[in-house]
Amino acid sequence: MIIMINGAFGVGKTSVANELVRRLDGTMLFDPEEVGFMLRQIIPDEMKLQNEKTGDFQDLKMWKPLTVEVARQLRETYGKDLIVPMTIYNKDYFNTIHSGFLQIDPETYHFCLTAKKETIHERLIERGEEVGNWCFEQTDKCLEGFADSCFEQFIQTDDVGIEEIADFICKEIGQGAATKC
């Protein structure tokens, strides 16, 4: 099983993902940002393709296939189900990764956490982000991108706690009784 937890920076993805790992036996966290950070360190700016020079590692041509391949290797090597928090609002990138995950495991779920812009900004400040930094700058792009129905199933998180969101996801994936959900 692969559970994708998508949403804007600051919406609560990592907190929900960590709660799911705590509740669901046989799972591990896989954060595709780590693949992006690695690529950012390996590929010098002067080597980047023109369309990769955006400051967003998701635009690196290798990020999408490597994200899928790392997920595949984690599943094959460690035999764990994956909980994958990620901010991926580009529809084409999402479809590439989602279809890749489905090839790894047909039992792939996607949940997109949503919240009002004000809530997201409050949460970014609470986690120590500096007002106006890159995460803040991405909020409008994320909210606009996530308006597309391809990102369903949506979970509204304004005034909803992490435990309640995890309860909902566990119910949706049919894991209520068999685990600590």
Image: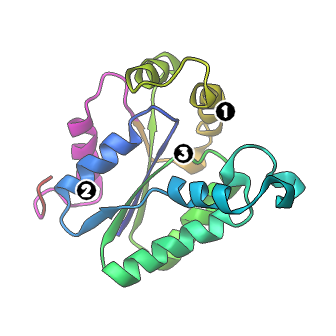
Residue ID at (56%, 61%): 35
Quarter that holds the N terminus: bottom left
Question: For the residue labelled by badge 2, is the local secondary structure a helix, a strand or a loop?
Answer: helix
Q: Which residue is more in the foreground, 33 or 88?
A: 33
Furthest-bottom residue in this view = 76
Indicate whether residue 45 is drawn in magenta: no
Q: Which residue is more in the foreground, 130 or 24?
A: 130
Which residue is label 2 attached to?
21
Start and end of the magenta stretch?
156-178
In the picture shown, does residue 20 fall above or below 114?
below
Q: How is the image coloured?
A: rainbow
Q: Which residue is more in the foreground, 70 or 94?
A: 70
Q: Mark 1 or 3 closer to N-term? A: 3
Which residue is label 3 attached to?
87
How far apart are the alpha carbons under marks 1 and 3?
Answer: 11 Å
Indicate whether residue 172 is drawn in magenta: yes
Question: For the residue labelled by badge 3, is the local secondary structure a helix, a strand or a loop?
Answer: loop
At label 2, the amino acid type is: Val
At label 3, the amino acid type is: Thr
- The answer to whether residue 109 is visible is yes
Which residue is label 1 attached to?
141
Q: Mark 1 or 2 closer to N-term? A: 2
Give residue 66's position: percent from left, percent from top: 60, 70
Residue ID at (10%, 59%): 177
How far apart are the alpha carbons under marks 1 and 2?
Answer: 29 Å
Q: Mark 2 or 3 closer to N-term? A: 2
Nearest to the eye among marks 1 and 2: give it: 2
Residue ID at (58%, 48%): 88
Give residue 41's position: percent from left, percent from top: 65, 57
Question: For the residue labelled by badge 1, is the local secondary structure a helix, a strand or a loop?
Answer: helix
